Image (tube, grey):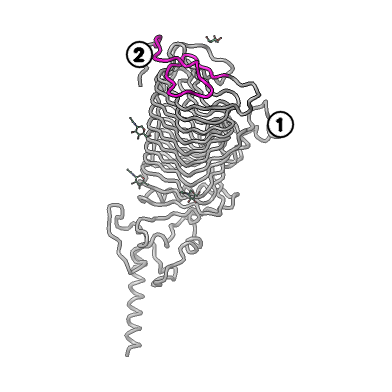
């Protein structure tokens, strides 16, 4: 009797299953693992999956498991896949499930594109680049105008750049690009490896013939490794970005940016490899980060305001710079920048503001505080005659510099402690120095004295060495800026 009824129930369940499986496109039943109430081994299941399909273990159909029912929400319209109950918002899209090989040789670009296309459709989803794999990825754009918000790019493996010139066409501005996203996070312990050495040796003069031959075909335009454009609420954390052909990490037209606990690393001799480059971006915080590269550790360009940088190590590199601004008679606006609690070791400059002659606009409300320097060529620099060509012609207009505070800047220098070279026609005003103590690394070598030109402001405490060249008060010859110049 009981045997028969059990059999009946069995048949009934089987029928239910068949109906469910023919109704929903994703169903555990197809995998023969259905109705098991033990946890499925998610990762191994996912890896066995075929190419280009979303893993059923992460995206169960409604019929997959009977023990929970998802609450409908605006983002979970009928026919969409529901996340598993343990983490109601964790839709995961692993690049391996989209056909990526991760062997460091196979071109995995298509798999990354497919995984992104899937992640893009789900709010707060996660695109997974798993640990212990090396993914060769060609230049790619993770483009977002139509993506759902708050996507996480979980990077635990390594992404490597192609080194053949073919992959770069006639030259691209970036390798990995995230654009027009609302809420984008890159996190994990993974590595973005630019393999930039083939690009660094491009200038003919200082290259041995073998390297010159190898790099001869790389395009002249060098890409930034990782670039964010036009995005809001961006976080980059945990990862390492190394050996970029040019700049490592760039933010352009971004608002509300958090960068912390990352590492940027390339040799001090690598040409033009900025660490982090900010342009037209607001409300940016960069902290607890190690930056070593061949150019500026952080470069702040026009259109930036409310930038807060703290607890950063810089070196090797050229220091932390605002500018060069005003190149080719352009207008530049930079304000409210704080740089504090920074260690600089073996860098060309410490904290620097550089502008080209002929620019307009202004740099104001800048604070450099608690900067420890060791073996830094010139720790404090304002250079309003910046020129990276052989010569630049003298021009009267300039980016106006005002309200720049230097507080507690201590350590050793190797060339000159302070160099404040301001515009003749538009002198710097409101420069303040407090607790500046800079000692030559080797006492007996010839060093340059502090230098000031058209620099006005105040010493709040005595300095080491004494800075007698700063002019007190306000510049009398200060040209009135036209409305056209004001920011
Ligand atoms: C910013 O992004 C985080 C992480 O993606 C998210 O939790 C938060 O809600 C977002 N904030 C806003 C104001 O959009
Ligand atoms: C920093 O990132 C690493 C991964 O690179 C992670 O293991 C570590 O927990 C993170 N530290 C903090 C304080 O977030
Ligand atoms: C200056 O920037 C900081 C962030 O670094 C921000 O908290 C503050 O409100 C800004 N001040 C002004 C006047 O915008
Ligand atoms: C520009 O002006 C500086 C200082 O007045 C002067 O030493 C320099 O020779 C001038 N350069 C050119 C190219 O005229």
Residue pictured at 36% horizontal, 68% vertical? 65
**Magenta stretch holds residue 230:** no
Q: How many marks?
A: 2
Question: Residue 217 versus residue 443: which sits nearer the camera?
Answer: 443
Return the x and y of residue 264 as percentages of the image width and height: 53, 40
Q: CA distance from mark 1 to mark 2?
A: 51 Å
| Residue 369 vertical placement versus 193 (above, below) | above
Quadrant location of residue 80?
Answer: bottom left
Q: Is residue 170 visible?
A: no
Residue 441 placement, left or right of 208: left
Residue pictured at 44% horizontal, 41% vertical? 259
Image quadrant holding the C terminus, namely top left
Question: Helix or strand or loop: what does disc 2 sit on?
Answer: loop
| Residue 148 vertical placement versus 358 (above, below) | below
Residue 487 placement, left or right of 218: left
User: Quarter containing ligand 4?
Assistant: top right
Residue pictured at 42% horizontal, 36% vertical? 229
Farthest residue in the right direction? 209
| Residue range of the region highlighted in magenta in the rendering | 449-478
Q: Which residue is mark 1?
A: 208
- Nearer the observer: mark 1 or 2; the answer is 2
Q: Which residue is mark 2?
A: 482
Question: Residue 180 versus residue 425: which sits nearer the camera?
Answer: 425
Question: Helix or strand or loop: what does disc 1 sit on?
Answer: loop
Q: First in sequence: mark 1 or mark 2?
A: 1
Return the x and y of residue 254 as percentages of the image width and height: 39, 35
Q: Is residue 190 visible?
A: yes
Q: Estimate how packed mark 2 is, as few (under 14), some (14 to 19) or many (20 or more) residues with alpha carbons within 10 Å.
A: few
**Magenta stretch holds residue 451:** yes
Residue 2 placement, left or right of 94: left
Return the x and y of residue 238 as percentages of the image width and height: 48, 47
Return the x and y of residue 253 as percentages of the image width and height: 40, 33
């Amino acid at each position: 009797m009981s045997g028969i009824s059990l059999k009946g129930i069995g048949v009934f369940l089987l029928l239910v299953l068949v109906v469910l499986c023919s109704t929903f496109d994703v169903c555990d039943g197809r995998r023969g693992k259905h109705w098991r109430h033990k946890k499925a081994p998610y990762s191994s299941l996912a890896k066995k999956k075929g190419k280009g399909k979303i893993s059923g273990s992460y995206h169960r159909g409604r019929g997959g498991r009977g023990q929970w029912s998802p609450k409908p929400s605006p983002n979970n319209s009928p026919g969409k896949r529901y996340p598993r109950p343990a983490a109601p918002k964790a839709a995961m899209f692993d690049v391996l499930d989209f056909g990526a090989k991760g062997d460091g040789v196979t071109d995995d670009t298509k798999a990354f594109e497919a995984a992104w296309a899937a992640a893009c459709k789900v709010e707060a989803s996660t695109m997974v680049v798993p640990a212990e794999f090396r993914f060769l990825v060609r230049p790619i754009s993770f483009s977002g105008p139509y993506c759902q918000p708050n996507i996480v790019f979980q990077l635990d493996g390594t992404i490597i750049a192609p080194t053949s010139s073919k992959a770069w066409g006639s030259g691209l501005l970036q390798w990995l690009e995230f654009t027009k996203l609302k809420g984008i996070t890159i996190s994990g312990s993974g590595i973005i490896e630019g393999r930039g050495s083939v690009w660094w040796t491009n200038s003919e003069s200082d290259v041995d013939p073998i390297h010159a031959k190898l790099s001869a075909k790389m395009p002249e335009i060098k890409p930034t490794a990782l670039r964010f454009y036009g995005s809001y609420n961006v976080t980059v954390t945990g990862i390492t970005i190394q050996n970029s052909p040019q700049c490592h990490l760039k933010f352009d037209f971004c608002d509300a940016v958090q960068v912390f606990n990352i590492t940027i690393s390339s040799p001090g001799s690598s040409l033009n490899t900025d660490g982090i480059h900010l342009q037209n971006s607001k409300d940016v915080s960069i902290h607890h980060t190690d930056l070593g590269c061949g150019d500026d550790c952080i470069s702040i360009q026009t259109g930036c305001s409310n930038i807060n940088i703290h607890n950063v190590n810089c070196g090797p590199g050229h220091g932390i710079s605002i500018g060069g601004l005003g190149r080719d008679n352009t207008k530049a606006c930079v304000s409210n920048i704080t740089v504090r609690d920074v260690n600089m070791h073996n860098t060309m400059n410490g904290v620097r503001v550089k502008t080209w002659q002929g620019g307009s606009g202004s740099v104001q409300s800048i604070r450099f505080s608690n900067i420890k320097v060791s073996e830094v060529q010139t720790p404090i620099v304002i250079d309003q005659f910046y020129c990276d060509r052989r010569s630049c012609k003298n021009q009267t207009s300039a980016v106006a510099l005002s309200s720049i505070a230097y507080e507690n800047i201590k350590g050793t220098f190797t060339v000159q402690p302070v160099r404040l070279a301001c515009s003749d026609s538009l002198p710097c005003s409101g420069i303040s120095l407090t607790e500046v103590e800079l000692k030559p690394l080797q006492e007996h070598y010839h060093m340059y004295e502090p230098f000031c030109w058209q620099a006005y402001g105040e010493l709040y405490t005595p300095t080491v060495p004494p800075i007698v060249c700063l002019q007190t008060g306000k510049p009398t010859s200060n040209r009135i800026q036209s409305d056209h110049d004001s920011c």
